[in-house]
Amino acid sequence: MWINAQDLQRQRSAIAATLRQAGIIPTQQRLDIALVMLTKPQHLSADQVLELVNRARKSVSKATVYNTLSLFSRTGVVREVRLDPNRVFYDSNTADHYHLYNEDTGILTDVATGCVRHDALPPLPEGTALTGIDVIIRIRNV
């Protein structure tokens, strides 16, 4: 798919505005990373983002990608989905939803919140408030 220069400039301007709204200074490298992450709904690992950014651009370091994705996650620009201590995806969809993870293919898919029932939650400890519910449904091919 080819994006003409005018469309690319419009996307970059919109993404820069999104970053500013989140309190992030839109540097060139942050814009390049955000352009990869935010142009469509997707789940990418930091290594996948690194590969895509470097394919489109000359060179961004691994540390820059990891630090930028961490910043994007902390500020709500992307959602971090931690499958285990060594496997993290970054989700461009920050709306409330759950995930289906295929352990054989490594594919993470969105699941609407209405598709999973949780009628009763345990009592929360005193002095706490619910901030969200994360559900990852793990599957394997048969």
Image (cartoon, rainbow, N blue to C red):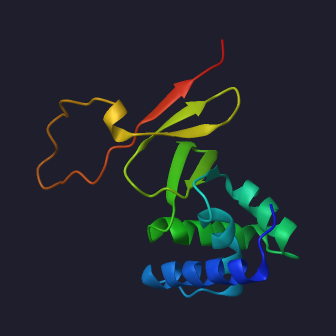
Residue in the picture at 63% in, 44% down: 87
Residue in the picture at 39% in, 43% down: 134
Identify whether 140 is placed above or below 117: above
Q: Position of residue 115 (x, y in %)?
A: 36, 31
Q: Quadrant of the N terminus?
A: bottom right
Q: Position of residue 26 (x, y in %)?
A: 59, 86
Identify whether 36 is placed above or below 60: above
Q: Quadrant of residue 84?
A: top right
Q: Position of residue 94 (x, y in %)?
A: 44, 58
Identify whether 129 is placed above or below 113: below
Residue sitting farthest toward the left: 126
Decide which of 130, 13 is in the foreground and name it. 13
Q: How many marks?
A: 0
Q: Is residue 95 left or right of residue 52?
A: left
Q: Quadrant of the C terminus?
A: top right
Q: Quadrant of residue 5?
A: bottom right
Q: Quadrant of residue 49?
A: bottom right
Identify whether 87 is placed above or below 118: below
Q: Position of residue 80 (x, y in %)?
A: 51, 55
Q: Is residue 21 left or right of residue 107?
A: left
Residue sitting farthest toward the top: 142
Q: Is residue 49 left or right of residue 23?
A: right
Residue in the picture at 69% in, 58% down: 46
Residue in the picture at 56% in, 39% down: 109
